[in-house]
Image: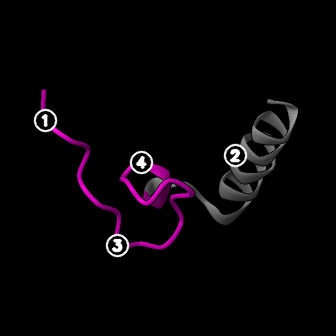
Amino acid sequence: MSEAPKCGCGRSPTGNCIGWHALSEEEYRKKETEYNAKKASK
């Protein structure tokens, strides 16, 4: 299994590319909020 490519856009919270570079600023903020809420609930 290959490792996910590293992210150079600075948007990925994991450091690996998860496709967030293609999101608009509004979509990015929403995804970031959802990600942080999910992470905090664990």
Amino acid marked by disc 3: Gly
Q: CA distance from mark 2 to mark 4?
A: 11 Å
The CA distance from mark 4 to mark 3 is: 11 Å
Q: Residues within 10 Å of mark 2 (few under 14, many from 20)?
A: some
Residue under the image location 43 percent in, 60 percent down: 15
Is 8 magenta? The answer is yes
Q: Residues within 10 Å of mark 4 (few under 14, many from 20)?
A: few
Residue ID at (34%, 72%): 8
Residue wearing tag 4:
19
Give the extent of the magenta segment: 1-21
- Circle 3 SS class: loop
Q: Quadrant of residue 6?
A: bottom left
User: Mark 3 or mark 1, which is nearer the start of the sequence?
Assistant: 1
As rendered, which of 7 and 19 lies closer to the eye?
A: 7
Where residue 5 appears, as percent x and y from the top left, is: 23, 52
Residue occupied by mark 1: 2
Tell whether 21 sits left or right of 24.
Answer: left
Residue type indicated by callout 2: Lys
Q: Which residue is mark 3?
A: 8
Q: Nearer the viewer, mark 4 or mark 3?
A: 3
Distance between the alpha carbons at the discs numbered 1 and 3? 18 Å
Circle 1 Cα neighbour tier, 10 Å, few/some/many (<14 / 14–19 / ≥20): few
Indicate which label's residue lies in the foreground, 4 or 1.
Answer: 1
Label disc, if present, on residue 28 of the rendered structure: none
Q: Are marks 4 and 1 in contact (CB under 8 Å)?
A: no
Which secondary structure lies at badge 1? loop
